[in-house]
Amino acid sequence: MKIQGQPHRAIEADHSRRVARILDQTFLPHRVEWRDLETVEGAAEAIKVMRVRGAPLIGATAAFGLFFALREDASDTALQRAYTMLHATRPTAVNLRWALDRVKRAVEPLGVGHRAEAAWGEALAICEEDVRTNHAIGKNALELFRAAQSKKGDTSTPLNVMTHCNAGWIACVDWGTAISPIYQAHDAGMNVHVWVSETRPRGQGASLTAWELREHGVPHTLIVDNNAGHLLQRGLVDLVIVGADRVTAQGDVANKIGTYLKALAAKAHQVPFYVALPVSTIDWNITDGLRDIPIEQRSAREVTHMPGIVSDGRLDEVLITPPDTAARNDGFDVTPAGLVTALVTEHGIFAANAPSLAELRP
Ligand code: MRU
Protein backbone atom coordinates (compact mmCIF):
# COMPACT_ATOMS: atom_id res chain seq x y z
CA MET A 1 0.00 0.00 0.00
CA LYS A 2 1.08 3.61 -0.10
CA ILE A 3 2.70 5.99 2.35
CA GLN A 4 2.36 9.57 1.18
CA GLY A 5 1.64 8.27 -2.31
CA GLN A 6 4.67 5.94 -2.50
CA PRO A 7 4.09 2.16 -2.67
CA HIS A 8 5.61 0.22 0.22
CA ARG A 9 5.52 -3.12 1.97
CA ALA A 10 5.79 -3.49 5.75
CA ILE A 11 8.98 -5.50 5.23
CA GLU A 12 11.12 -5.01 2.13
CA ALA A 13 14.05 -7.13 1.01
CA ASP A 14 17.19 -5.34 -0.12
CA HIS A 15 18.63 -7.93 -2.50
CA SER A 16 22.05 -6.38 -3.02
CA ARG A 17 22.83 -5.96 0.70
CA ARG A 18 20.77 -8.97 1.79
CA VAL A 19 19.04 -7.02 4.56
CA ALA A 20 15.35 -6.68 5.42
CA ARG A 21 14.01 -3.16 5.81
CA ILE A 22 11.10 -2.79 8.21
CA LEU A 23 8.72 0.06 8.88
CA ASP A 24 9.38 0.60 12.61
CA GLN A 25 5.85 0.60 14.02
CA THR A 26 6.90 1.86 17.45
CA PHE A 27 7.11 5.37 15.93
CA LEU A 28 3.70 5.35 14.24
CA PRO A 29 1.58 7.36 13.75
CA HIS A 30 3.96 10.19 14.61
CA ARG A 31 6.95 9.35 12.44
CA VAL A 32 7.63 7.08 9.47
CA GLU A 33 10.96 5.44 10.23
CA TRP A 34 12.56 2.52 8.44
CA ARG A 35 15.10 0.22 10.02
CA ASP A 36 17.45 -2.34 8.51
CA LEU A 37 17.48 -5.81 10.02
CA GLU A 38 20.69 -7.71 9.35
CA THR A 39 21.20 -10.07 12.28
CA VAL A 40 19.09 -12.74 13.92
CA GLU A 41 19.32 -10.80 17.19
CA GLY A 42 18.00 -7.69 15.44
CA ALA A 43 15.08 -9.63 13.96
CA ALA A 44 14.22 -11.17 17.33
CA GLU A 45 14.40 -7.78 19.05
CA ALA A 46 12.15 -6.18 16.42
CA ILE A 47 9.49 -8.85 16.98
CA LYS A 48 9.82 -8.78 20.77
CA VAL A 49 9.49 -5.00 21.20
CA MET A 50 6.86 -4.85 18.43
CA ARG A 51 8.72 -2.79 15.86
CA VAL A 52 6.98 -5.37 13.68
CA ARG A 53 3.80 -7.02 14.88
CA GLY A 54 0.71 -8.74 13.50
CA ALA A 55 0.74 -12.50 12.98
CA PRO A 56 1.77 -12.70 9.29
CA LEU A 57 4.46 -10.00 9.59
CA ILE A 58 6.01 -11.66 12.63
CA GLY A 59 6.30 -14.85 10.56
CA ALA A 60 7.92 -13.11 7.59
CA THR A 61 10.40 -11.28 9.85
CA ALA A 62 11.35 -14.50 11.61
CA ALA A 63 12.01 -16.15 8.22
CA PHE A 64 14.56 -13.43 7.42
CA GLY A 65 15.93 -13.89 10.94
CA LEU A 66 16.82 -17.52 10.14
CA PHE A 67 18.58 -16.35 6.97
CA PHE A 68 20.69 -13.87 8.97
CA ALA A 69 21.67 -16.64 11.40
CA LEU A 70 22.56 -19.11 8.65
CA ARG A 71 24.63 -16.50 6.83
CA GLU A 72 26.92 -16.42 9.87
CA ASP A 73 26.88 -20.12 10.66
CA ALA A 74 24.84 -22.71 8.75
CA SER A 75 25.43 -25.65 11.10
CA ASP A 76 22.54 -27.65 12.62
CA THR A 77 23.40 -26.20 16.03
CA ALA A 78 23.23 -22.60 14.80
CA LEU A 79 19.96 -23.31 12.98
CA GLN A 80 18.39 -24.71 16.12
CA ARG A 81 19.71 -21.85 18.28
CA ALA A 82 18.24 -19.25 15.91
CA TYR A 83 14.94 -21.12 15.67
CA THR A 84 14.64 -21.22 19.47
CA MET A 85 15.57 -17.55 19.87
CA LEU A 86 13.02 -16.37 17.29
CA HIS A 87 10.29 -18.73 18.47
CA ALA A 88 10.60 -17.43 22.04
CA THR A 89 9.85 -13.81 21.05
CA ARG A 90 6.04 -13.93 21.08
CA PRO A 91 3.92 -16.94 22.04
CA THR A 92 0.41 -16.49 20.65
CA ALA A 93 0.61 -15.94 16.87
CA VAL A 94 1.15 -19.35 15.28
CA ASN A 95 2.38 -17.82 12.00
CA LEU A 96 5.73 -17.36 13.73
CA ARG A 97 6.16 -21.12 14.19
CA TRP A 98 4.68 -21.78 10.77
CA ALA A 99 7.26 -19.59 9.01
CA LEU A 100 10.18 -20.91 11.08
CA ASP A 101 9.16 -24.51 10.35
CA ARG A 102 8.84 -23.75 6.66
CA VAL A 103 12.33 -22.27 6.38
CA LYS A 104 13.80 -25.00 8.57
CA ARG A 105 12.22 -27.71 6.40
CA ALA A 106 13.60 -26.08 3.26
CA VAL A 107 17.19 -25.76 4.49
CA GLU A 108 17.71 -28.82 6.70
CA PRO A 109 18.25 -31.36 3.89
CA LEU A 110 20.84 -29.10 2.20
CA GLY A 111 24.56 -28.98 2.69
CA VAL A 112 25.75 -26.11 4.89
CA GLY A 113 27.11 -24.23 1.89
CA HIS A 114 23.62 -23.88 0.39
CA ARG A 115 21.49 -23.23 3.43
CA ALA A 116 21.69 -19.45 3.75
CA GLU A 117 20.80 -18.83 0.12
CA ALA A 118 17.85 -21.25 0.37
CA ALA A 119 16.63 -19.47 3.52
CA TRP A 120 16.74 -16.10 1.74
CA GLY A 121 14.70 -17.61 -1.12
CA GLU A 122 12.16 -19.08 1.27
CA ALA A 123 11.78 -15.78 3.17
CA LEU A 124 11.13 -14.01 -0.14
CA ALA A 125 8.61 -16.68 -1.13
CA ILE A 126 6.77 -16.28 2.20
CA CYS A 127 6.53 -12.53 1.54
CA GLU A 128 5.27 -12.92 -2.03
CA GLU A 129 2.69 -15.51 -0.97
CA ASP A 130 1.53 -13.29 1.88
CA VAL A 131 0.71 -10.50 -0.57
CA ARG A 132 -1.26 -12.82 -2.88
CA THR A 133 -3.01 -14.51 0.06
CA ASN A 134 -4.15 -11.27 1.64
CA HIS A 135 -5.43 -9.94 -1.65
CA ALA A 136 -7.49 -13.14 -2.05
CA ILE A 137 -8.82 -12.87 1.53
CA GLY A 138 -9.94 -9.33 0.76
CA LYS A 139 -11.62 -10.40 -2.48
CA ASN A 140 -13.53 -13.16 -0.69
CA ALA A 141 -14.60 -10.92 2.19
CA LEU A 142 -15.69 -8.25 -0.28
CA GLU A 143 -18.53 -10.59 -1.29
CA LEU A 144 -19.74 -10.48 2.33
CA PHE A 145 -19.53 -6.69 2.28
CA ARG A 146 -21.57 -6.55 -0.92
CA ALA A 147 -24.18 -8.90 0.55
CA ALA A 148 -24.41 -6.73 3.68
CA GLN A 149 -24.71 -3.61 1.53
CA SER A 150 -27.55 -5.07 -0.54
CA LYS A 151 -29.31 -6.38 2.57
CA LYS A 152 -29.19 -2.86 3.87
CA GLY A 153 -30.71 -1.73 0.58
CA ASP A 154 -29.54 1.86 0.94
CA THR A 155 -26.27 2.79 -0.77
CA SER A 156 -26.49 6.44 0.24
CA THR A 157 -25.58 5.58 3.82
CA PRO A 158 -22.21 3.93 4.37
CA LEU A 159 -21.67 0.28 5.16
CA ASN A 160 -20.49 0.54 8.75
CA VAL A 161 -17.71 -1.93 9.45
CA MET A 162 -16.20 -2.35 12.91
CA THR A 163 -12.69 -3.69 13.42
CA HIS A 164 -10.33 -4.19 16.34
CA CYS A 165 -6.57 -3.86 16.72
CA ASN A 166 -4.65 -3.66 13.46
CA ALA A 167 -5.09 -6.38 10.86
CA GLY A 168 -4.10 -4.07 8.04
CA TRP A 169 -1.17 -4.02 5.61
CA ILE A 170 1.39 -3.22 8.30
CA ALA A 171 0.35 -6.35 10.23
CA CYS A 172 1.27 -8.35 7.13
CA VAL A 173 3.60 -7.83 4.19
CA ASP A 174 0.86 -6.00 2.30
CA TRP A 175 -2.94 -5.57 2.05
CA GLY A 176 -3.77 -6.91 5.52
CA THR A 177 -6.35 -9.53 6.40
CA ALA A 178 -9.41 -7.84 7.97
CA ILE A 179 -8.57 -4.49 6.36
CA SER A 180 -7.90 -5.94 2.89
CA PRO A 181 -11.64 -6.07 1.98
CA ILE A 182 -12.05 -2.54 3.33
CA TYR A 183 -9.37 -1.26 0.93
CA GLN A 184 -10.86 -3.27 -1.93
CA ALA A 185 -14.40 -2.02 -1.16
CA HIS A 186 -13.21 1.58 -0.97
CA ASP A 187 -11.20 1.24 -4.21
CA ALA A 188 -14.28 -0.27 -5.94
CA GLY A 189 -16.28 2.84 -5.02
CA MET A 190 -18.32 1.27 -2.21
CA ASN A 191 -19.50 3.70 0.44
CA VAL A 192 -17.70 2.17 3.44
CA HIS A 193 -17.01 3.64 6.86
CA VAL A 194 -14.90 1.99 9.57
CA TRP A 195 -15.34 2.09 13.34
CA VAL A 196 -11.77 1.79 14.61
CA SER A 197 -11.50 0.71 18.22
CA GLU A 198 -8.60 2.14 20.13
CA THR A 199 -7.25 -1.26 21.35
CA ARG A 200 -5.81 -0.45 24.74
CA PRO A 201 -3.20 -0.84 26.02
CA ARG A 202 -0.89 -0.71 22.99
CA GLY A 203 -3.38 1.29 20.94
CA GLN A 204 -2.92 -0.54 17.61
CA GLY A 205 -6.34 0.73 16.47
CA ALA A 206 -5.68 4.36 17.42
CA SER A 207 -2.10 4.53 16.23
CA LEU A 208 -1.88 2.02 13.37
CA THR A 209 -5.30 1.29 11.84
CA ALA A 210 -6.31 4.96 11.97
CA TRP A 211 -2.97 5.87 10.35
CA GLU A 212 -3.37 3.26 7.58
CA LEU A 213 -6.94 4.23 6.76
CA ARG A 214 -6.04 7.92 6.71
CA GLU A 215 -3.13 7.27 4.30
CA HIS A 216 -5.55 5.45 1.98
CA GLY A 217 -8.40 7.95 2.36
CA VAL A 218 -10.90 5.49 3.84
CA PRO A 219 -13.55 7.22 6.01
CA HIS A 220 -13.22 6.09 9.62
CA THR A 221 -14.03 7.10 13.18
CA LEU A 222 -11.97 6.22 16.23
CA ILE A 223 -13.85 4.93 19.28
CA VAL A 224 -12.70 3.92 22.73
CA ASP A 225 -12.89 0.15 23.19
CA ASN A 226 -15.81 0.45 25.58
CA ASN A 227 -17.98 2.11 22.93
CA ALA A 228 -18.30 -1.02 20.78
CA GLY A 229 -21.27 -2.58 22.61
CA HIS A 230 -23.15 0.70 22.55
CA LEU A 231 -22.74 1.11 18.76
CA LEU A 232 -23.74 -2.51 18.10
CA GLN A 233 -26.82 -2.15 20.31
CA ARG A 234 -27.93 0.99 18.42
CA GLY A 235 -27.74 -0.63 14.97
CA LEU A 236 -24.76 1.51 13.94
CA VAL A 237 -22.62 -1.45 12.86
CA ASP A 238 -23.43 -3.61 9.81
CA LEU A 239 -20.65 -6.13 10.34
CA VAL A 240 -17.57 -6.73 12.46
CA ILE A 241 -14.37 -8.06 10.90
CA VAL A 242 -11.13 -8.81 12.76
CA GLY A 243 -7.89 -10.69 12.16
CA ALA A 244 -6.53 -13.66 14.09
CA ASP A 245 -3.31 -14.79 15.71
CA ARG A 246 -4.23 -18.46 16.04
CA VAL A 247 -7.32 -20.41 15.07
CA THR A 248 -7.88 -23.96 16.27
CA ALA A 249 -8.95 -26.89 14.08
CA GLN A 250 -12.50 -26.40 15.36
CA GLY A 251 -12.58 -22.62 14.75
CA ASP A 252 -11.85 -20.99 18.12
CA VAL A 253 -10.08 -17.67 17.48
CA ALA A 254 -7.28 -16.03 19.46
CA ASN A 255 -6.95 -12.36 18.61
CA LYS A 256 -6.08 -9.10 20.36
CA ILE A 257 -7.52 -8.65 23.83
CA GLY A 258 -11.03 -7.18 23.51
CA THR A 259 -12.02 -9.23 20.46
CA TYR A 260 -14.12 -11.60 22.59
CA LEU A 261 -16.22 -8.77 24.04
CA LYS A 262 -16.97 -7.50 20.54
CA ALA A 263 -17.99 -10.99 19.43
CA LEU A 264 -20.33 -11.33 22.42
CA ALA A 265 -21.97 -7.99 21.74
CA ALA A 266 -22.25 -8.74 17.99
CA LYS A 267 -23.98 -12.05 18.76
CA ALA A 268 -26.39 -10.37 21.18
CA HIS A 269 -27.43 -7.90 18.48
CA GLN A 270 -27.38 -10.31 15.50
CA VAL A 271 -24.55 -8.48 13.76
CA PRO A 272 -22.26 -10.74 11.66
CA PHE A 273 -18.85 -11.29 13.24
CA TYR A 274 -16.22 -12.32 10.66
CA VAL A 275 -12.62 -13.36 11.15
CA ALA A 276 -10.19 -12.91 8.24
CA LEU A 277 -7.09 -15.11 8.22
CA PRO A 278 -4.60 -16.91 6.04
CA VAL A 279 -4.71 -20.71 6.39
CA SER A 280 -1.23 -20.46 7.98
CA THR A 281 -2.97 -19.02 11.08
CA ILE A 282 -4.77 -22.31 11.71
CA ASP A 283 -3.02 -24.49 14.27
CA TRP A 284 -4.08 -27.99 13.24
CA ASN A 285 -2.56 -29.51 16.39
CA ILE A 286 -5.16 -28.05 18.73
CA THR A 287 -8.94 -27.96 19.01
CA ASP A 288 -9.87 -26.18 22.23
CA GLY A 289 -8.74 -22.55 22.11
CA LEU A 290 -9.32 -21.79 25.79
CA ARG A 291 -7.30 -24.78 26.88
CA ASP A 292 -4.60 -24.89 24.24
CA ILE A 293 -3.71 -21.39 23.01
CA PRO A 294 -0.91 -19.72 24.98
CA ILE A 295 -1.86 -16.15 25.87
CA GLU A 296 0.98 -13.65 25.89
CA GLN A 297 1.43 -11.81 29.18
CA ARG A 298 2.89 -8.36 28.57
CA SER A 299 4.39 -5.74 30.81
CA ALA A 300 2.17 -3.97 33.36
CA ARG A 301 3.84 -0.75 32.26
CA GLU A 302 1.81 -0.83 29.02
CA VAL A 303 -1.33 -0.51 31.17
CA THR A 304 -0.10 2.04 33.67
CA HIS A 305 1.56 4.34 31.13
CA MET A 306 0.34 5.96 27.91
CA PRO A 307 2.70 6.84 25.05
CA GLY A 308 2.30 9.90 22.84
CA ILE A 309 3.69 13.22 21.78
CA VAL A 310 4.30 15.44 24.83
CA SER A 311 4.08 19.24 24.93
CA ASP A 312 7.63 19.87 23.69
CA GLY A 313 7.01 17.60 20.67
CA ARG A 314 8.96 14.60 21.95
CA LEU A 315 7.64 11.02 21.83
CA ASP A 316 7.29 10.01 25.47
CA GLU A 317 5.00 8.18 27.87
CA VAL A 318 3.06 9.39 30.88
CA LEU A 319 1.89 7.62 34.03
CA ILE A 320 -1.92 7.42 34.25
CA THR A 321 -2.36 5.54 37.54
CA PRO A 322 -1.33 5.99 41.16
CA PRO A 323 2.31 4.95 41.50
CA ASP A 324 2.88 1.19 41.81
CA THR A 325 -0.67 0.21 40.84
CA ALA A 326 -0.79 -3.51 40.09
CA ALA A 327 -1.85 -4.17 36.49
CA ARG A 328 -2.47 -7.29 34.44
CA ASN A 329 -1.85 -7.24 30.71
CA ASP A 330 -3.16 -10.24 28.74
CA GLY A 331 -2.22 -9.63 25.12
CA PHE A 332 -4.95 -11.77 23.54
CA ASP A 333 -8.26 -13.47 24.24
CA VAL A 334 -10.10 -16.42 22.76
CA THR A 335 -13.42 -16.08 20.95
CA PRO A 336 -15.17 -19.46 20.90
CA ALA A 337 -16.15 -20.73 17.44
CA GLY A 338 -19.84 -20.45 18.32
CA LEU A 339 -19.59 -16.65 18.26
CA VAL A 340 -17.94 -16.52 14.82
CA THR A 341 -20.28 -16.08 11.85
CA ALA A 342 -17.63 -17.23 9.36
CA LEU A 343 -13.90 -17.48 8.78
CA VAL A 344 -12.70 -15.78 5.60
CA THR A 345 -9.54 -17.30 4.11
CA GLU A 346 -7.66 -17.08 0.82
CA HIS A 347 -9.49 -20.26 -0.24
CA GLY A 348 -12.99 -19.01 0.49
CA ILE A 349 -15.44 -18.61 3.35
CA PHE A 350 -15.77 -21.36 5.94
CA ALA A 351 -18.01 -22.06 8.92
CA ALA A 352 -16.11 -22.02 12.22
CA ASN A 353 -16.33 -25.73 12.93
CA ALA A 354 -14.12 -28.79 12.52
CA PRO A 355 -15.85 -30.46 9.53
CA SER A 356 -15.88 -27.25 7.52
CA LEU A 357 -12.25 -26.37 8.31
CA ALA A 358 -11.10 -29.92 7.56
CA GLU A 359 -11.37 -29.06 3.85
CA LEU A 360 -8.45 -26.67 4.36
CA ARG A 361 -6.17 -29.11 6.13
CA PRO A 362 -2.86 -29.39 4.27
O1 MRU B 1 0.00 -7.67 19.47
P1 MRU B 1 -0.18 -7.51 17.98
O2 MRU B 1 -0.24 -6.08 17.55
O3 MRU B 1 0.87 -8.29 17.21
O4 MRU B 1 -1.59 -8.16 17.68
C1 MRU B 1 -2.05 -8.19 16.36
C2 MRU B 1 -3.41 -8.76 16.24
O5 MRU B 1 -4.03 -9.17 17.20
C3 MRU B 1 -3.96 -8.89 14.85
O6 MRU B 1 -5.35 -8.77 14.86
C4 MRU B 1 -3.59 -10.27 14.29
O7 MRU B 1 -2.22 -10.50 14.42
C5 MRU B 1 -3.99 -10.41 12.89
S1 MRU B 1 -2.94 -9.45 11.84
C6 MRU B 1 -3.37 -9.70 10.23
Image (spheres, rainbow, N blue to C red):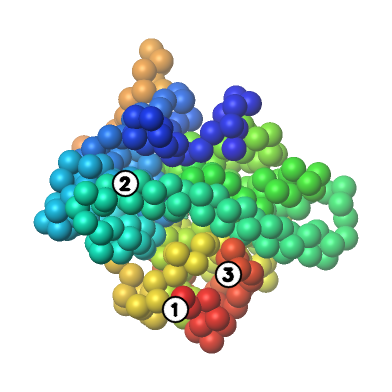
Under circle 1, the secondary element is loop
Q: Is mark 1 within 8 Å of ligand 1?
A: no
Classed neighbour count for the residue bearing mark 1: other residues with Cα under 10 Å, few (<14), some (14–19), many (≥20): many
Q: Of tags 1 and 2, which is closer to the observer?
A: 2
Q: Is residue 165 left or right of residue 284?
A: right
The answer to which of 21 and 244 lies nearer the viewer is 21
| Percent coordinates x, y for residue 93 in the rendering | 37, 59
Looking at the image, tell me whether mark 1 or mark 3 is earlier in sequence order. Answer: 1
Residue drawn at x 36%, y 78% as measured from the top left: 286
Classed neighbour count for the residue bearing mark 2: other residues with Cα under 10 Å, few (<14), some (14–19), many (≥20): some
Distance, label 1 to label 3, CA atoms, is 12 Å
Residue linked to disc 2: 117
Residue drawn at x 78%, y 60% as measured from the top left: 146
Under circle 2, the secondary element is helix
Looking at the image, tell me whether mark 1 or mark 2 is earlier in sequence order. Answer: 2
Three-letter amino acid code at disc 3?
Answer: Leu
Is the residue under label 2 in contact with that under label 3 (CB below 8 Å)? no
Taking the image as drawn, is residue 92 in sight?
Answer: no
Q: Residue furthest bottom?
A: 355
Residue drawn at x 67%, y 71% as measured from the top left: 270
Q: Is residue 38 above or below residue 187?
A: above
Residue linked to disc 1: 249
